[in-house]
Image (cartoon, grey):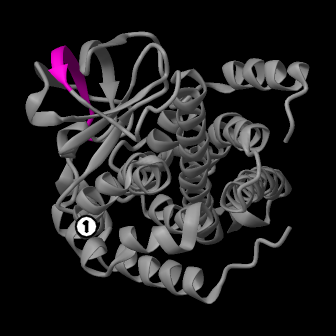
Amino acid sequence: MDFTPTEEQEAARDLAARIFGDLATHERLAAAGTGSDAELWKALCAAGLPGAVEETGLLGLVLLLEEQGRRTAQVPLAATCVYGILAVARHGTEEQRARLLPGLRDGTTVVTGAFPATGGVVAHEGRLSGAVEWVPWLRDATHVLVADAERGLWLVRTEDAAQMESVELTAPWSAGRLVLDGTAAERLGTGAGTGADTRTGAYADVLAAARVAFAGLQAGVCAGSLARAVEYTSVREQFGRPLSTHQAVQLRAADAHMDTEAIRVTAYEAAWRHDEGLDATEAALTTAWWASEAGKRVVHTGQHLHGGMGADLDHPVHRHFLWGRQLDAYLGCGTELLAELGDVLAKGEPS
């Protein structure tokens, strides 16, 4: 098990860090409000970073998302790579890959996901009906990867949806409510055979990849929050010396650092297993649990260590707090993930 990035992964990560550092500034993020940054998204796609994920794999994507999370950059990178590029590349037909991947690479096609499956959408003869109360980055998307009640995967063009309403989440993810009413949909893949194993397998694979990717994003959010806290406590003085010299502050920061590393390492392991073609179900649930539970602790710590400044809604650290809390809830909270992991372990499924 080797998590050392390849030269290609390192190059992509370093390029992403430069682009996010140049464009995802506090002023630009404040100006974006609850919307996405179109100029930043264009720059990332022009640099070939979404398309590079086909070669660098899920681990390469996790490295990119760490850099996004450090800056809380408002672009649909995680969604379009997991629900679009990786899903189509792994489960799409040859025709779907040829038709969809070029637009996904250059950013003209943006895919988000109505995940996880909650039974709210029903498929009948290639048409979908039902509602998904909130879908991240829906307002940016040209397509939605929808999981139906039987865990089949369908691509829906957003322009064909019966209704889309803006929804404001804890984090500014350009989310929306998706309503489908006999909406035409395209099955991802062939749907060959009886369908149950084929559909469930593809759904489980995409869900596991999504959990790993968003855990990587959470690792970056936590690292960014902690870095801001370290910088602040190093210059803010109390009783004539920097806050960072106080033992209580050091212990709190140390705990946050360990939590952040736990999220990162478990995300790397799960991504590595996924890229190697090994079963990543347990590992994906493990890193998702760390991202939920530990991530929540870290962003609270980041805000707490800023003292009164942490209560300022316009302070940059508050964005990390909002993102951390949103990621805590997305794709399953801690107790739900533990229950699911327990079921997997009880069944003795291979890992």
Q: Going 16% across and 20% down the picture, which residue do you hit?
A: 183
Amino acid type indicated by mark 1: Pro
Q: Is residue 325 visible?
A: yes
Q: Answer above or below: position of 186 versus 134.
A: below
Q: Considering depth in this image, is 144 or 188 the residue closer to the camera? A: 188
- Quarter placement of the N terminus: bottom right
- Residue farthest toward the front in the current orientation of the protein: 193
Q: Going 49% across and 22% down the picture, which residue do you hit?
A: 151
Say which residue label 1 marks.
Answer: 102
Q: Is residue 239 visible?
A: no
Residue 245, image x, y percentages: 78, 66
Residue 186, image x, y percentages: 26, 34
Residue 220, image x, y percentages: 56, 59
Q: Answer above or below: position of 345 versus 174.
A: above
Residue 102 lies within the magenta run: no
Point out the stretch of residues depicted in magenta. 174-184
- Quarter placement of the C terminus: top right
Secondary structure type for disc 1 = helix
